[in-house]
Image: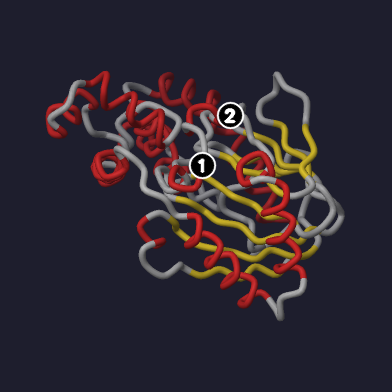
C-alpha cells in the first residue's frame, strides 16, 4: 500500500497530528482498531468501506468517508479489495472545531462526512481530490478545506491544556487534581471534555495509559506481563488483563499472537503497529 503523510501548517498543527493519503490493497479484508486517544476523518475516493463500531452492532457502509471521535472500544474496519482515501489523524480535541455538534453525540457512533459537512460540500471536495495531480496536491487541498472550516470552540483551550497534562503522564495523573489545577469543578471539566473530545478526563487517561502500554510491548520477544502492568500503573495483573480485554476484546497473550501474525505475514507493512487482523 502507498501511504503518504505530512504534518499541517499552523494553526492546524495544534489540532492535527498528520494528514495522510492511502491507496492500494489492504493486508486483510477486516482490521480491528483498538481505541486510541485520537479522532479520525476519512474522505473516501474508492469503493465503500465498512465499519463495525463494537461487537453488539451491525457493520455499516461508508461511501463518502467517515468521521470518528475518540472511541472507547475497539472497532472493525472492513476494506474493499482496493482502497483509496485521504484522511486526518486529529489530536483528541482536534476534531471539535470542525463539528456542528458536541463530540459526545458521535462517541462510538461513526458517521458519514455528509452528515457533518453536508452533501454538496463533500461532493465538491471529493471531486477536487479525485482530479488532483497526486497525493501531495490532495493533502494540500484537504488542508485548505480544513483551514476554511476552522471555527472558534468554547472551552477548547482548557481541554487542550488539561489533555496535555494527561498525555504527559501517560494517563497516570490523578483526575481529581486536574480540576483543581484548572480552577473549575470536576463536573464542569468533565462536561467540557465530553463536548470537545467526546469522553471524560478519566476515560481519556485510560486510553493514554493503554496506548502507552501497548506500544511498550515488543511482540518479537518474550513479554513479562507483571512488569509491564506494574510499570504502567495498573493495580495488578488482573486489572491489566481486564482493561486489555475491554479495550481490544482480546487477552494480552492473544493480542501478542495476533500482532505476531501481522509481522509474520506482512513484515514492514505501513499499517503494522496498531491495527490487528480481524479475519
The crowding category of the residue bearing disc 2, from other C-alpha atoms within 10 Å (few below 14, some 14 to 19, many at least 20), is many
**Residue 211 lies in quadrant:** top left
Q: Determine the residue positioned at 72% across, 37% down.
A: 51
Q: Does residue 93 appear left or right of residue 115 in this picture?
A: left
* Residue 108 image label: 2
Point out the residue furthest to the front here: 120
Q: Determine the residue positioned at 76% across, 61% down.
A: 84
Q: Does residue 66 appear left or right of residue 102 in this picture?
A: right
Badge 2 element: loop
* Residue 99 image label: 1
Q: Quadrant of the N terminus?
A: bottom right
Return the x and y of residue 200 as percentages of the image width and height. Answer: 37, 26
Return the x and y of residue 204 as percentages of the image width and height. Answer: 38, 33
Which is more foreground, mark 2 or mark 1? 1
Does 148 sit above or below residue 232?
A: below
- 129 and 243: which is toward the camera: 129
Badge 1 element: loop
Contact between labelled residues 1 and 2, with CB atoms less than 8 Å apart: no
Does 93 sit above or below residue 11?
A: above
The crowding category of the residue bearing disc 1, from other C-alpha atoms within 10 Å (few below 14, some 14 to 19, many at least 20), is some
- 266 and 247: which is toward the camera: 247
Point out the residue furthest to the bottom here: 133
Q: Determine the residue positioned at 42% across, 43% down.
A: 92
Amino acid at each position: 500500500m502507498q501511504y503518504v503523510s505530512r504534518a499541517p501548517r499552523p494553526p492546524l498543527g495544534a489540532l492535527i497530528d498528520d494528514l495522510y493519503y492511502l491507496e492500494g490493497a489492504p493486508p486483510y479484508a477486516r482490521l480491528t482498531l483498538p481505541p486510541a486517544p485520537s479522532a479520525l476523518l476519512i474522505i473516501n475516493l474508492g469503493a465503500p468501506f465498512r465499519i463495525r463500531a463494537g461487537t453488539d452492532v451491525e457493520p455499516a457502509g461508508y461511501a463518502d468517508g467517515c468521521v470518528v471521535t475518540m472511541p472507547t472500544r475497539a472497532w472493525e474496519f472492513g476494506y474493499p479489495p482496493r482502497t483509496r482515501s485521504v484522511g486526518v489523524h486529529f489530536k483528541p480535541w482536534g476534531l471539535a472545531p470542525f463539528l456542528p455538534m458536541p463530540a459526545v453525540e458521535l462517541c462510538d457512533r461513526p458517521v458519514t462526512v455528509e452528515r457533518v459537512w453536508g452533501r454538496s460540500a463533500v461532493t465538491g471536495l471529493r471531486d477536487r481530490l479525485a482530479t488532483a495531480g497526486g497525493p501531495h496536491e490532495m493533502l494540500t487541498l484537504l488542508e485548505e478545506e480544513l483551514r476554511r472550516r476552522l471555527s472558534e470552540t468554547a472551552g477548547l483551550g482548557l481541554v487542550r491544556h488539561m489533555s496535555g497534562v494527561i498525555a504527559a503522564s501517560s494517563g497516570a495523573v490523578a483526575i481529581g487534581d486536574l480540576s483543581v489545577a484548572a480552577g473549575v469543578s470536576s463536573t464542569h471539566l468533565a462536561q467540557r471534555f465530553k463536548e470537545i473530545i467526546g469522553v471524560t478526563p478519566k476515560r481519556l487517561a485510560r486510553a493514554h495509559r493503554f496506548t502507552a502500554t501497548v506500544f511498550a510491548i515488543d511482540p518479537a520477544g518474550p513479554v513479562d506481563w507483571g512488569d509491564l502492568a506494574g510499570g504502567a500503573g495498573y493495580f495488578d495483573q488482573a486489572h491489566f488483563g481486564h482493561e486489555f480485554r475491554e479495550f481490544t476484546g482480546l487477552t494480552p497473550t492473544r493480542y501478542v499472537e495476533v500482532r505476531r501474525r501481522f509481522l509474520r505475514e506482512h513484515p514492514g507493512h505501513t499499517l503494522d503497529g496498531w491495527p490487528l487482523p480481524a479475519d
